[in-house]
């Protein structure tokens, strides 16, 4: 038994400017609830494909490679930021929310990309960064020029320092990238002035969401992109915009360790929900179910569910799942608690294994052969929406030996290279076996690719039934054929041996579907009656005997 389903011998060829039939666009608008079970593919624009040969990915590059995504079978594409930005945090420092950074292309390129994607049946979600801007944003520069007490300063968190001459930060908050969350300004006359808050890098000043101008500006930015046809927004630091009244001290150091575990005065404040209720009315005013996806680090799944009440956002990333190890009992616990938490608000659960901020899951799960593939098939069998990070469909590992001089992650410079390094998951994709930057572009690549990645390229894997790319293509094809896979809000757990997860899903009036995952490093004989029916797909070789090999997932239909 191989996992190969369809015969795919043709590589997805670049086709810039592919036709975008108008009827596909209108069909898309008619599909209700398209997002509930959608597989959403994250494109990291710097590293996807480079059309102009400058070593940096760009929008025309993405556009040319859209057929790869359509062929893969995903439902939507989420694009990390491509806006005008000095790139202090790889584009998460935006200096103009309505402009494209020249490094990535033009506004026309963006609209052409959206139209082409729609023509291929793909929806487009763009990143929105509302917690902070770049320090080069016109508002922040003007705020610095206008000085203390000015209206412009009320759009950010400017405060006088503590200590005799204001030489100490206004409170004890720490930046996520290390060091104090405050930087002191210099007044127009050259003397030391107020401090400003930045939960991330100093180049990323936090907006003050008490300001009506900030609120109005983001309403307008939402409409700007909705008018250009985007199907939704991934909201960066969605839990961060509102800070506790008076910016109270934390009273302790090492605050980073508390992220996602504990209530903090700068994260997950109740006031943030008012913003999403406001945004929801804007999203709902457009046809075709435009969605909001929260990147929300909260202390519990129940707190995350609050962002997904029917009049707020649609989905949130499930970081609790991403952070769970390869352990059947723990996985079952987090799957249950994730599903339970979303039920009261009626939102779909989401699942994610990799993104541009974490170590790629193949490496995180220990580089054990087949384990990443087994994890992927488990994720894709769960009810709800799944997020796939570019390159995971190729089984790319984390690049762990990047030389210091090529690194760009701001946390590297703060932490002296000790932790928080995110460059290793951002290395440009290999498209071809050979050639300059393995088909990424005609120039080099902004981070060096391991030479061995030629064999992991789209070209090398296409048509090879044992490849991870064909496994993803097959899995997504099965998901389309069996809508029960992404639908619903629960799984029926089946009795299974130690270290094995097994569950059944049944579509309304449809066939039953069974998924079993062996997390053990040895083969396990499945409980009688479990391995019945037709094998749909397996993450590795499976002979149909009922003995599930180590680190393997199998899907059956009854
Ligand atoms: C989360 C983004 O995913 C990350 O890349 C970025 O550094 C921070 N938010 C700050 O915008």
Image: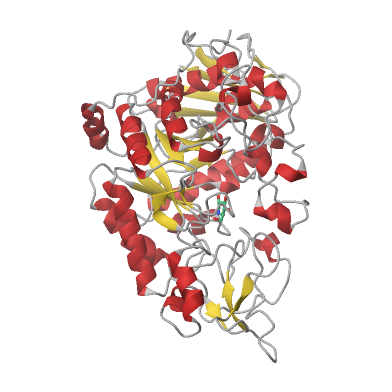
> Which quadrant of the rendered structure holds the N terminus?
top right
Image height of 210 relative to 124, above or below: below
Work out whether residue 400 can be spotted.
Answer: yes
Image quadrant of residue 428? top right
> Which quadrant of the rendered structure holds the C terminus?
top left
Image height of 32 relative to 460, above or below: below
Q: Residue furthest front?
A: 189
The residue lying at 53 percent from left, 46 percent from top is 318
Work out whether residue 35 can be spotted.
Answer: no
The residue lying at 41 percent from left, 24 percent from top is 70
In the image, residue 507 lies at what x, y percent? 38, 27
Image height of 301 relative to 434, above or below: below
Q: Is residue 260 left or right of residue 20?
A: right
In the image, residue 55 lies at what x, y percent? 58, 35
Residue nearest the observer in this picture, 199 or 62: 62
Q: Is residue 311 left or right of residue 51?
A: left
Image quadrant of residue 385? top left
The residue lying at 63 percent from left, 12 percent from top is 542
In the image, residue 502 lies at what x, y percent? 58, 28
Q: Residue furthest bottom?
A: 164
Image quadrant of residue 196? bottom right
């Amino acid at each position: 038994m191989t996992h190969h389903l369809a015969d795919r011998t043709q590589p997805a060829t670049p086709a810039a400017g592919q036709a975008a039939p108008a009827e596909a666009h209108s069909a898309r608008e008619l599909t209700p609830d398209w997002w509930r079970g959608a597989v959403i593919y994250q494109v990291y624009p710097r590293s996807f494909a480079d059309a102009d040969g400058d070593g940096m990915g760009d929008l025309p590059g993405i556009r040319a490679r859209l057929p790869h995504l359509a062929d893969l079978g995903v439902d939507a594409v989420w694009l990390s930021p491509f806006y005008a930005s000095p790139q202090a945090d790889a584009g998460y420092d935006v200096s103009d929310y309505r402009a494209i950074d020249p490094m990535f292309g033009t506004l026309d390129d963006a609209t052409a990309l959206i139209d082409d994607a729609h023509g291929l049946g793909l929806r487009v979600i763009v990143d929105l960064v509302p917690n902070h801007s770049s320090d080069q944003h016109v508002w922040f520069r003007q705020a610095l020029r206008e000085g203390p007490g000015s209206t412009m300063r009320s759009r950010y968190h400017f405060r006088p320092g503590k200590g005799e001459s204001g030489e100490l930060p206004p409170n004890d908050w720490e930046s996520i990238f290390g060091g104090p969350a405050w930087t002191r300004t210099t007044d127009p006359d050259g003397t030391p002035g107020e401090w400003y808050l930045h939960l991330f890098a100093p180049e990323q000043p936090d907006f003050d969401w008490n300001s009506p101008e900030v609120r109005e500006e983001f309403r307008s930015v939402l409409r700007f992109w909705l008018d250009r046809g985007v199907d939704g927004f991934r909201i960066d630091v969605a839990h961060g915009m509102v800070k506790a009244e008076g910016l109270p001290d934390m009273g302790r150091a090492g605050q980073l360790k508390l992220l996602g575990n504990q209530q903090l005065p700068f994260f997950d404040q109740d006031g943030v929900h008012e913003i999403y209720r406001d945004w929801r009315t804007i999203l709902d005013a457009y046809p075709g179910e435009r969605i909001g996806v929260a990147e929300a680090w909260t202390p519990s799944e129940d707190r995350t569910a609050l962002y997904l009440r029917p009049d707020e956002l649609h989905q949130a990333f499930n970081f609790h799942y991403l952070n769970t190890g390869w352990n059947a009992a723990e996985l079952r616990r987090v799957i249950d608690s994730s599903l339970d938490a979303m039920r009261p608000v009626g939102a779909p659960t989401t699942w994610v294994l990799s993104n541009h901020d974490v170590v790629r899951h193949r490496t995180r799960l220990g580089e054990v052969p087949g384990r990443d593939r087994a994890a992927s098939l488990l994720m894709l069998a769960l009810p709800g929406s799944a997020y796939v990070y570019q390159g995971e469909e190729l089984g790319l590992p984390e690049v762990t030996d990047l030389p210091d001089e090529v690194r760009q992650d701001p946390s590297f410079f703060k932490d002296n290279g000790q932790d928080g390094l995110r460059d290793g998951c951002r290395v440009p994709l290999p498209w071809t076996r050979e050639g300059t930057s393995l088909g990424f572009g005609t120039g080099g690549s902004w981070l060096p690719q391991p030479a061995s990645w030629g064999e992991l390229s789209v070209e090398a894997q296409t048509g090879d039934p044992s490849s991870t790319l064909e496994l993803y293509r097959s899995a997504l094809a099965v998901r389309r054929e069996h809508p029960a896979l992404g639908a619903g809000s629960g799984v029926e757990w089946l009795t299974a041996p130690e270290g094995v997860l097994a569950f059944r899903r049944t579509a309304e009036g449809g066939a039953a579907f069974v998924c079993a995952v062996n997390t053990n490093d040895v083969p396990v004989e499945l409980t009688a009656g479990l391995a019945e029916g037709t094998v749909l797909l397996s993450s590795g070789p499976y002979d149909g005997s009922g003995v599930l090999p180590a680190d393997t997932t199998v899907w059956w239909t009854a």
